[in-house]
Image (tube, rainbow, N blue to C red):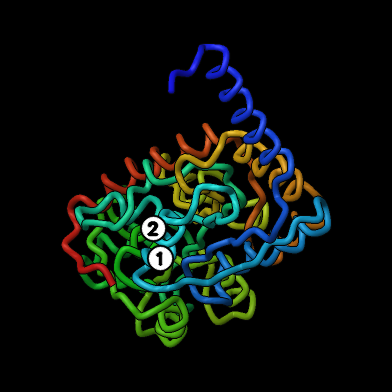
Amino acid sequence: MKYTPWAIGIAWALLASAANAQAQSFPNRPIRVIVPFPPGGGTDATARILTQALAESAGWQLVVENRPGATGRIGTEFAARAPADGYTLLLGTAGPNAILPSTRVKLPYDAVKDFAPISLIDSADYALVAHPSAPIRTVRDLITLAQSRPGQITFASAGNLSVAHLAGEFFKQFAKLDIVHIPYKGGGPAVVATLSGETTLYFGGPSVVHQSKAGKLRAIATTGAKRSKIFPELPAIAETLPGYEISQWVGVLAPANTPKDIVTNVHTTFVKAISTAKVTQQFAAVGSQPVGNTPDEFAAHIKAEIAKWQKVVGGLKVQID
């Protein structure tokens, strides 16, 4: 059967009309948000804040689905393989979306090609803390002490290639120090080790600053490019070591080939939801700040993060947990 140009044109118009109608009606059912980590962590907290914010600002229903395992690889792969219809989104983080892709480990997904970035949601600076018995009150004190005791100063982490681990490795590179990494199975045991004096230092999430206020740890500095708005009393490491910057971030991504209209819709709605004073306060309570940027800006951020971590990870000989 031979189709005329007129008939083909009508067919394309109908397809375009159907796609447009689908985009305009989106969403017409709950959206599944994949968190590739267990409940109770920082990424999960961001997901719960988003769930409430989207319900209040747009009437959207988000269903948080935790798929932990393999340092975030399991949930991230699941999201990459989901239908590209906007009804499965991923909360990506530095670990599975930038640090692991910077290694030579073969991953079951491509962090750049398998996703459509939508927006950064929030970011949090890490904090450098020390056991109170150590004669360390400033970054300069730490550098001086480590130079006088090569190989004797230890820092804990939540595990090999965790952000806490690489924050310490990045510090070693910048300051040209010989300090020793001690990996633990999670952030909790790493904090306990530093609290007990088993290790000297820990590069941890914002919650460790509260331990310092209780006198159990001594907060030295934060890891952002400049002073944290949440902990402005602490200097940034970059004030002593210009160029040093580490942050944990959470962003929303869709599977690759998700229709552009849906990506735009999700982006606009999410950014509007996180821009409220209420959400800013909720993020501050867990030590983070809302961001919100364009899909192109988020895509560039991921590529820049992968390039940065490649420089840090390149010389390390560690086994991925």
User: Which sits earlier in the primary sequence, circle 1 or circle 2?
Assistant: 1
Q: Is residue 309 left or right of residue 23?
A: left
**What type is the residue that disc 2 sits on?**
Pro
Q: Could you tell me if residue 222 is visible in this image? A: no
- Give the total number of marks visible in the rendering: 2
Task: Give residue 136's quadrant in the image.
Answer: bottom left
Q: Which residue is mark 1?
A: 72
Q: Position of residue 318 (x, y in %)?
A: 20, 66
Q: Find the residue positioned furthest to the front.
A: 1
Q: Is residue 319 left or right of residue 208?
A: left
Q: Residue at x 47, y 59 (%)?
A: 138
User: What secondary structure is found at the residue carrying circle 1?
Assistant: helix
Q: Find the residue positioned furthest to the top.
A: 5
Q: Which residue is mark 2?
A: 96
Marking on residue 255: none
Q: Residue at x 82, y 52 (%)?
A: 57
* Mark 1 crowdedness (10 Å alpha carbons): few <14, some 14-19, many ≥20: many
Q: Position of residue 222 (x, y in %)?
A: 52, 56
Q: Position of residue 96 (x, y in %)?
A: 39, 58
User: What secondary structure is found at the residue carrying circle 2?
Assistant: helix
**What type is the residue that disc 1 sits on?**
Gly
Q: In this view of the protein, which residue sits in the foreground, 215 or 78?
A: 78
Q: Residue at x 20, y 50 (%)?
A: 314
**Quadrant of the frame with the C terminus:** bottom left
Q: Residue at x 47, y 40 (%)?
A: 257
Q: In this view of the protein, which residue sits in the foreground, 45 or 318?
A: 45
**Quadrant of the frame with the N terminus:** top left
* Mark 2 crowdedness (10 Å alpha carbons): few <14, some 14-19, many ≥20: many
Tag 1–tag 2 contact (CB < 8 Å): yes
Q: Is residue 239 above or below residue 68?
A: above
